[in-house]
Image (spheres, helix red, strand yellow):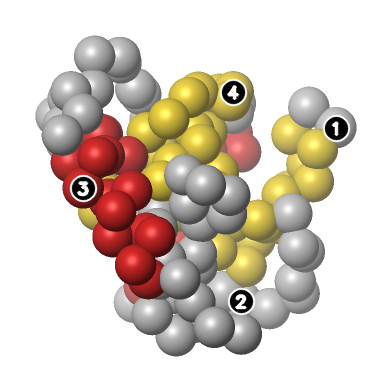
Amino acid sequence: MQKSFDSWNERKKSINDLVFSGYFHEREIWWCSLGMNIGDEEDGKNEFFERPVLVIKKFNRDIALIVPLTTKLKDNKYYLNFTHEEIQYAVILSQLRLVSSKRFRRRIRKINQNLFNIIREQIIEVSI
């Protein structure tokens, strides 16, 4: 599959000029413009190159540590499958990354604390 890096580059320029005026918090799932990435890194979809992500850590109003989510469930140590509000997701544990809040498009929902703790523990387990 041929990737459209030029269209992502144009979109990235406009995202960089944005001023994020919202608020985000840990445990929230957001649509996030992750872009067109290299190799097996998780790409965003649609014209805004978005995909859902879970905010793991908020460092300040501009920077967050996130993990991408997918609805393609997999059974291996790098994915953690879960159901939230009757929607099945998988956290892509191996693709933890730091992003600017300018990439956040819109909030989807917030997960409960118990599920969030399980996800954080799995991230630590995979990262060590």
Labels 4, 3: front one: 3
Q: How many marks?
A: 4
Give the mark, 1 or 3, whose residue is nearer the N terminus: 3
Earlier-in-chain disc, 1 versus 2? 2
**Residue matched to label 1:** 86
Residue 99 visible here:
yes
Kindly identify the amino acid type of the residue bearing the numbered disc 1: Glu
Q: CA distance from mark 1 to mark 3?
A: 36 Å
Return the residue nearer the eye: 122 or 3: 3
* Marking on residue 77: 2
Disc number placed over residue 109 in the picture, else none:
4
User: What amino acid is labelled 3 in the image?
Assistant: Lys
Which residue is found at the position 59% from the left and 23% from the top? 109
Element carrying mark 2: loop
Residue at the disc numbered 3: 13
Residue type at mark 2? Lys
Look at discs 3 and 2 and give the one toward the viewer: 3
Badge 1 crowding class, 10 Å Cα cut-off, few under 14, some 14 to 19, many 20 or more, is few
Q: Percent position (x, y) of residue 105?
A: 43, 30
Q: Position of residue 77 (x, y in %)?
A: 61, 76
Q: Secondary structure at mark 4?
A: strand
Q: Residue at x 21, y 47 (%)?
A: 13
- Judge whether residue 118 can be spotted in this image: no
Q: Dot 1 lies on which element? A: loop
Above or below, 102 against 2 in this view is above
